[in-house]
Image (tube, helix red, strand yellow):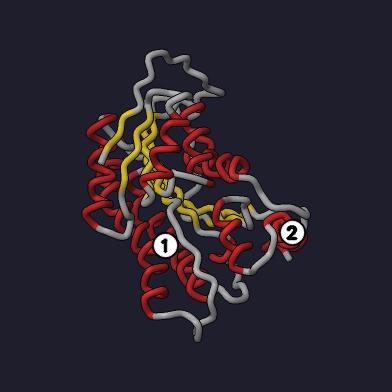
Amino acid sequence: MLISANPRTYREKVHNMRLKNKVALITGGGSGIGLATARLFLKEGAKVAISDISEKNGKRALSELKKLSPHAIFIHGDVSKEEDAKRMVKETVSKFGKLDILVNNAGILIEKTLEELTVEEWDRIMAINVRGIFLVSKYAIPEIRKSGGGAIVNNASCNALVGDYGDPAYCASKGAVGLLTKAMGLDYAKDNIRVNAVCFGEICTPMTKQEAKTRGMPFKEYCRKVGELHPMGRLGTPEEAARAILFLASDEASFMTGALVPVDGGLTAI
């Protein structure tokens, strides 16, 4: 399902127009990092399609985004389903005429040890975090190639670089994203398609609230304790995450591909 943003009045607000005339698809764009990235991309001159598995979040996000620009749409779908992934790309191109940038942001977290995990939970986290990137990229790459090249940015998490307690499935999925990024970067360099990944530390998003709830901790206390694990002494913000994604998606990163970029307040430097 596609919902178009078409406000009666539009006052274009852009910064340096780093994404002028670019078209981007952002998965998991209904909240958190994905929504912050969509906001920033619109401000930088891009036309943006967001997708999300939550229709409620997607519609709410679109309502916010269309206040910035009419050049935004929401596509409801599940990245782990091939037909949905294919449709996300098709509807983006149908609306905006092309595709230049893909941000594979959709992801889930299940905090359980191997013994606690069910087979269904293991399969679900792999389906969203890894299969989803494979599927959306599979259908996006031919369209980006038609545009003369572009950029794919994968959300790999710092767990693509280091392990963590109690998150084996998540760590395995993000480790897979890390090497998938490198392999994609090699395969599509000849097509002028750059593929990089951001490896975030803890970013304060709705997922953070889920983690606090899972641990039975008040949200503010959880943020304080997790923030102290980062050398910079705090959590990152969705806006800080979005700026890193913007850099990799823009021509400012024109000589980068296959890179895993830590944006983690120094967490992986320990």
With respect to residue 90, does 108 lie above or below? Answer: below
Asked where in the image residue 71 lies, by quadrant, the reply is: top left
Circles 2 and 1 in contact, beta carbons < 8 Å: no
Q: Position of residue 52 (x, y in %)?
A: 38, 48
With respect to residue 87, does 17 lie above or below? Answer: above
Q: Which residue is mark 1?
A: 129
**Residue closer to the observer: 187 or 222:** 222
Residue beneath the point at 45% across and 51% down: 105
Spatial CA span between label 2 and label 1: 28 Å
Give SS at disc 2.
helix
Question: Which image quarter holds the C terminus?
Answer: bottom right
| Amino acid at dot 2 | Glu
Residue beneath the point at 50% across and 24% down: 17
Q: Position of residue 13 (x, y in %)?
A: 52, 19
Q: Position of residue 179 (x, y in %)?
A: 45, 65
Question: Which image quarter holds the N terminus?
Answer: top left
Side of 90 where 129 appears, left or right: right
**Label 2 neighbour load within 10 Å: few <14, some 14-19, many 20+:** few
Quick check: can you spot residue 101?
no
**Label 1 neighbour load within 10 Å: few <14, some 14-19, many 20+:** many
Give SS at disc 1.
helix
Q: Position of residue 245 (x, y in %)?
A: 52, 43
Say the numbered circle drawn on residue 258.
none
Q: Which residue is mark 2?
A: 221
| Amino acid at dot 1 | Asn
